Amino acid sequence: MKILLAGGAGYIGSHTAVELAQKGHEIIIVDNYSNSSKKVIDRIEKIISRPLEVFEADIKDKESMQPIMKETKPDCIIHLAGLKAVGESIENPVEYYRNNIDTTLTLLECMKESSVKRIVFSSSATVYGEENPIPYVETMKKGNCSNPYGWTKYMMEQILEDAACADKELSVVILRYFNPIGAHISGEIGEDPQGVPNNLMPYIAQTAVGRREHLTIFGNDYPTKDGTCRRDYIHVMDLANGHLKAVEYAENNKGFDVFNLGTGEPYSVLEMINAFEKASGVKIKYEFGNRRAGDLPEYWADSKKAQEILGWKAVRTIEDMCRDTWNWQKNNPVGYA
Ligand code: NAD
Ligand code: WQD
């Protein structure tokens, strides 16, 4: 199948490109590198041992996207392009709504004009908001998001659902990721956030490699077993495999569907530090700080639906996630720079 990865140079897109290419699919990457490096492309090509078709473009710009879609005629789009920093979305909400919603609208318009009928969308556990019981199940009510980033995902899911309702030939698969971490086993590609990392795993990895002095744990007075928050961390290559299954599902099923992609097994911040120390042999300096606004004590996925319908299950352990993160970080102490 010919698959266009919108935002394919990013963290999840690059790993998904490898997974799909190694399963024989033809990959097209479109990215404006607003949150990624062009060097990613060489690394992916090195892993898969063949060249990729790559376009540098702003996906919200229809003038740029239309000719790409017409020229490449993909069978399926995977829409990963978006801004994703929660704190930044609170400071610059308009930029987040503009970029995230417009990329989606432009892709849908270009799909219609080029008769592309399948789209897989990167959504997030964040759409479950703040009031649902755990574990999260796809049938639960969405909304009550704590930040504009979360609302963009909520709105984009609605836009995609309406599009599928209007065009019965369309296949829309929504993937709600939990907490993706880890890296490709080769150590060639991995997570390389710009500036100070917002997320736990890259912060731990950069502390281990000496780029950060110490980690601050955001709160140790939560009602959890060790007082720190618990999350459902999932290996990025398991997530990449989820995209493969979603693309195959979209080929054979029309309509709108939603799947959680998580392991169903939460780990606390202290457990993550411990697991990383074991995998790397490096002691992580940390101190306890205040809670971070908007953080929930704990949540994890019920991913039975993905298992039953997509035939997908996360198979990599927390040890694999920490080992592969460390392998990437120690081989690339300053990321792709
Ligand atoms: P990322 O920032 O590494 O990748 C996103 C890519 O999209 C980047 O390469 C960026 O340059 C590109 N991009 C953004 N706006 C663009 C535009 N207008 N035109 C062209 N390219 C554009 O992020 P990621 O972690 O790989 O996440 C991929 C998707 O998954 C995002 O939509 C994100 O919201 C979603 N998601 C991520 C996580 C996570 O924790 N990483 C969790 C849930 C959902
Ligand atoms: C994990 C835990 C922090 C950094 C975010 C988004 C979510 C989704 C995934 C996109 C929390 C703690 C973190 C640090 C810490 N992204 N922590 N010190 O917040 O669960 O989810 O990424 O859709 O929408 O909100 O992930 O990695 O930021 O935090 O103590 O320096 O680590 O408090 O408990 P989070 P995270």
Image (cartoon, rainbow, N blue to C red):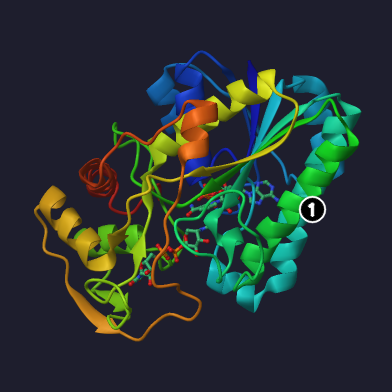
Whether 223 is drawn above or below 4: the answer is: below
Q: For residue 300, which quarter of the picture?
A: bottom left
Can residue 86 be seen? yes
Q: Residue at x 70, y 23 (%)?
A: 253
The local secondary structure at tag 1 comes to helix
Query: Which percent across, then down, holds residue 101?
Result: 76, 55
Q: Residue at x 51, y 46 (%)?
A: 37
Whether 332 is drawn above or below 207: the answer is: above
Q: Residue at x 75, y 70 (%)?
A: 94
Query: Which percent across, then down, holds residue 296?
Result: 45, 72
What amino acid type should be assigned to the residue bearing mark 1?
Answer: Asp
Left or right of 51? Residue 333 is left
- Count of marks, rendered view: 1
Q: For residue 78, which quarter of the picture?
A: top right
Query: Which percent across, then down, holds residue 183?
Result: 34, 41
The residue positioned farthest toward the left in the image shown: 281
Ligand 1 closer than 8 Å to the CB at disc 1?
yes
Whether 150 is drawn above or below 317: the answer is: below
Can residue 60 be seen? no
Quadrant showing the N terminus: top right
Whether 101 is drawn above or below 213: the answer is: above
Left or right of 220? Residue 16 is right
Label 1 Cα neighbours within 10 Å, binned few <14 / some 14-19 / many ≥20:
some
Q: Residue at x 64, y 47 (%)?
A: 81
Query: Which percent across, then down, holds residue 106?
Result: 82, 44
Left or right of 161? Residue 278 is left
| Residue that badge 1 annotates | 102
